Image: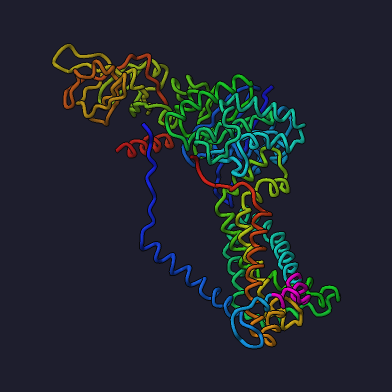
Amino acid sequence: MAYVELEELRRVFGTDVVALDGITISLEAGEFVSLLGPSGCGKTTALRLVAGFDRPTSGRVVVDGKDVTDVPPNRRDMGMVFQAYSLFPNLTAEKNVEFGLRVRGQPRAERRRRVRELLELVGLGHAAERYPHQLSGGMQQRVALARALAIEPRVLLLDEPLSALDAKVRVQLREEIRRIQLELGITTIYVTHDQEEALSISDRVAVMYRGRIEQIGTPAEMYGAPQTPFVAEFIGTMNRLPSTVAGEGWVEHGGTRLRVDAAAGREPGTRVLLLVRPETMELAPADGAAPVENALAGTIVTHTFLGAATRIRVDVGEGEITADVPTARAGQFAVGARVHASFPPATARVIELGEDAEAIVAAAQSDEG
Amino acid sequence: MVAVRPRRFIAPGAVVWLLVGAAYFLIPLIATFVFSMRHDATGKCCTLANYGTILHDPAFWKNIKTSFILSLETIAISLLLLVPTVYWVHLKVPRLRSVIGFLALVPFVVPPIILVVGLLDFYKGTPHWFYAEPYGFLVAAYVILAFPYVYFALDAGFRAIDVHTLTEAAHSLGASWPVTLVRVIVPNIKTAAMAGSFLTLAIVMGEFTIASLSAFHTFPIYIQQVNQDKLYAASAVSLLSFVITWAAMVALLFAGRGRQVQVGGAR
């Protein structure tokens, strides 16, 4: 049985602002689930409903088989780390961590032991006597994590805890959060708009959009098999090619027939979105040699150095596609050169395009423009 | 290599302005002090006899005690009323801030004579221990008088902290509303509360109109009476009241002193 269940949670502000439109998620005990989505998608609203800071318009929150929808936040036993620095400015790191234990009336010796343990766990044993303003942002969030864990919460809630930190500290701290979560085996809900963050530390990721869950799955599923145009757009970089099914295992894009295994079994003439990851694209010079199979012809527009790989954008007439090629080979594809961009038929995915999906694609393409 | 801390210089212009400012405040005090040392009968300088006369006058101590107790009572009631109110407004109904800000200006625009007549009429019929005693009626009036000072000080204090996040953090750790208010919010607005308290103390220690019109004997009434009878001694009383008020403020500061709370981001 699931340990935490969000059942048909709906939250409407005022009369018509639907922040959350009936989301349902189940978490197993000890699972780490991220709610991922752009600003305004409802992820923080969902987290606040779980924490008890807000009440749902309808639906319920169940923890360990008990409905806690109407339980006030101070009786839910949920530890929370906030986006904003939330340490009590008048208390030292040690006293901050101790706060929840004092409220619970734990004996002093027990409190001291637990506080020391937790500060060591987050690597801040040496900073126990420091006040929040004497700590860096990353250290403050570590103390906040220790404080949330001190009360041995049933569920740990993290609301974009790393968004105010610089990139290097963010990567370091997210790995620590995952390490600690695995060590303690605590059920965790993590809210973020950073897909890399969500994919790197979660057991499962729920992508949210307009108050709904678009797709939920393991990071590999979300990356490799997006089921909606929005997820395809949001997770990673994806070439999205509006196409038409042109036979068993074939699609047509801009007059070019392309072999795609995932198109098999679809009605010819169906409008689809062909999804190809940049790292699966192959580039070959279009220098009059034998035609390349499964390829779109185009002209190289830009190079972007990413380190081990270089991202190359190719104008294929009906838009641009992106290919990640090893940096060592990138030199042979000069800006302005004619190339063939191909992909293995088994690596591409296909999503049927409804009206809504067409709008998302159009919006995404106009953003790029 | 040894780091050399750069020497700090104060610009000559700043020194001049500092001296001008100091002169503005100090010259009247020095003049009052010199005046207070004139002999009561001859008018010649210099004697401390006027200070002796005042300090040995039981009425001086009685009235200053009355005003000091009135101040503390006013401060306590104002803070008890306003800290939870301002907290709630900031947390739950921030749009009411402008309304309360407007109401807080009312004591500034209503002349004390109107205020005291209105209050005397309003409280007519209340029990004797309230209506006829300074610690009842006068405190009620002084709380109104102190309202803008305490409110704006607290409002600034609450604006300087993230009330929502601190409250939610405390709740998520199991704190109830009273625990959150007492252990989390109050310590973080202490500086603002102290500022409001100092202003209230200064106002109540010097308030004359309401006390006089409602026929209570407070310290300012005493000063006025001394002023009528003994010209030089009145200056001594004024200076003593100044010193005592400042001493009271310092005492309050020490009483409420804790580690300086610094609100803000990371180091």
Which image quarter: residue A53?
A: top right
Q: In this figure, what is the number of numbered marks?
A: 0
Residue that protrudes farthest toward the right in the picture:
B128
The answer to which of A94 and A78 lies nearer the viewer is A94
Residue that protrudes farthest toward the top in the picture:
A290
Query: Residue B67: x percent and y percent?
Result: 73, 71
Query: Residue B252: x percent and y percent?
Result: 67, 58
Q: Is B221 placed left or right of B12 in the picture?
A: right
The answer to which of B264 and B195 lies nearer the viewer is B195
- Quadrant assignment for the N terminus of chain A: top right
Residue at horizontal 50%, vertical 26%?
A: A174
Residue numbers of the magenta segment? B52-65
Q: Is A85 placed left or right of B254 in the picture?
A: left
Relative height, residue A331 to residue B121 (above, below): above
Query: Is residue B201 visible to us here?
Result: yes
Which image quarter: residue B5?
A: top left
